[in-house]
Amino acid sequence: MQLDKIVAFHKAMGDPTRLRIVALLANGPLHGQAIAGKLGLTPPTITHHIKKLRDINVIFERRDKNTIYFHLNESLIKQQAKTLGKLIEKKEGEVEAMVQQNIERQKVIENFFTKDGKLKNIPAQRKKKLMVFEYMVRGLKAGKKYPEKELNEYITKFHEDYATIRREFIINHYMYRENAIYELNPEEMWAKPE
Amino acid sequence: MQLDKIVAFHKAMGDPTRLRIVALLANGPLHGQAIAGKLGLTPPTITHHIKKLRDINVIFERRDKNTIYFHLNESLIKQQAKTLGKLIEKKEGEVEAMVQQNIERQKVIENFFTKDGKLKNIPAQRKKKLMVFEYMVRGLKAGKKYPEKELNEYITKFHEDYATIRREFIINHYMYRENAIYELNPEEMWAKPE
DNA sequence: TAACTAATTAGATTAATATCTAATCGAGTG
DNA sequence: CACTCGATTAGATATTAATCTAATTAGTTA
């Protein structure tokens, strides 16, 4: 993930003068002094901004005699603009797999929990066990610190053997412990039923 | 859509810390101290960045006891990311008109407000009047409920005739009133200076 | 009410950055 | 070669903004 690049792109676009330059060039190439004139700024200022826009490949230039014409690289802008959306999006294919897995998991959950939300027993099969634990653990809040007592109480709402289950939470990396304070791990660390 | 907003959006995204916050929240809501911990920064720094992200509506928050969980407004990010692409697709003149309008509005604001932020007088011309009201109303928070007294006090910071101005806010759909409690309308409902 | 906890504000410091003027460069042209 | 013209560099200034510590606020709990 090239975070720096995304930052550089948005930083460049996050300035009114540069956006106005981009907007101007969207109507066709222009040379420096023309841009300066239209924006009411001096040539050095334009050079300054052009440099930043060129750094991120948003413009390129062609020379004609003494005059340099600046062109907009439109496709790059469109492409880069989408990158941010992708950053917060799930990856291809992941969606289908998720749907499938959801159906399966749903069945397991229904099998092992009563209508009151009690855990009938701890599944022996590893895959199902992890599904059950993940289900339970999702009721906890990311980033929140749980004293052991509070965590025990939480688990007891599902099953009275909180000690075993609490230990499983640690073993399977759903949570970690630091002097008797428990906290959820980021989801990437969780053991996953594959 | 005004240029200012596009600039504000990209400026907000043009900072590595804020991008990292966005990336974190893409995995689910988190509270301030958790973010601070994961990024190795202090809570005030997080508050600072959260404020900027909230200003552009990229995050919203829900409170649980003392803890405020910050959520990502994913659809807005995707939508805003596309806006830049649209900007450069605009036809000849349209962009310049937008820029022009911005300059004009800026001038009107400068003309009618003193350096201390006081409104000299209410413009007679409808177009200018709306520009002035919109400027004032942008200092109010979306979603917040304002008792009449509080709203009066806010308006008085600009001009002593709060009654007239408060009435104008309603007439022009910047706000609505429900038994003496005032609240901002969504921006789409505001009267716009065409 | 008092104590606690998470968030925010205030204020200071430091780093970036937008803009200008003046000086310089570099590619054509007489 | 000397001159011109557009672009760039250098350097100064002012503004914005990121971050911290310390103090304060606001909601919750004992």
Image: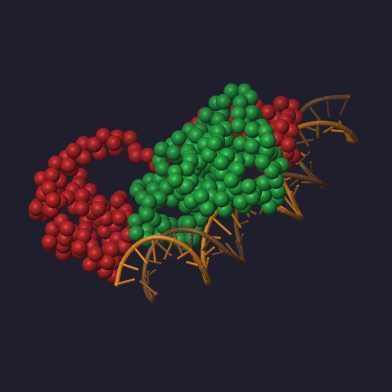
Chain colours: A red, B green, C brown, D orange
Whole-percent x, y for residue C8 in the image? 49, 58
Residue B102 makes an appearance in the image: yes
Residue A19 in the figure: left or right of residue B13:
right
Residue A5 in the image: above or below residue A173: above
Whole-percent x, y for residue D3 in the image? 89, 33
Tell me the residue at 62%/52% (across/down): B157
Whole-percent x, y for residue B21 in the image? 44, 51
Q: Nearer the viewer, residue B179 or A47?
A: B179
> In the rendered image, which quarter contains the C terminus of chain B?
top right
- Return the residue found at the far top: B92
Quarter of the image where one finds residue A180: bottom left
Residue B103 makes an appearance in the image: no
Q: Nearer the viewer, residue D18 or A8?
A: D18
> In the rendered image, which quarter contains the N terminus of chain B?
top right
Numbered label tally: 0
Tell me the residue at 10%/45% (across/down): A111
Tell me the residue at 56%/50% (across/down): B152
Whole-percent x, y for residue B29 in the image? 36, 50
Q: Nearer the viewer, residue B159 or B15?
A: B159
Residue A138 in the image: above or below residue B78: below
Residue B142 in the figure: left or right of residue B7:
left
Tell me the residue at 64%/28% (across/down): B97
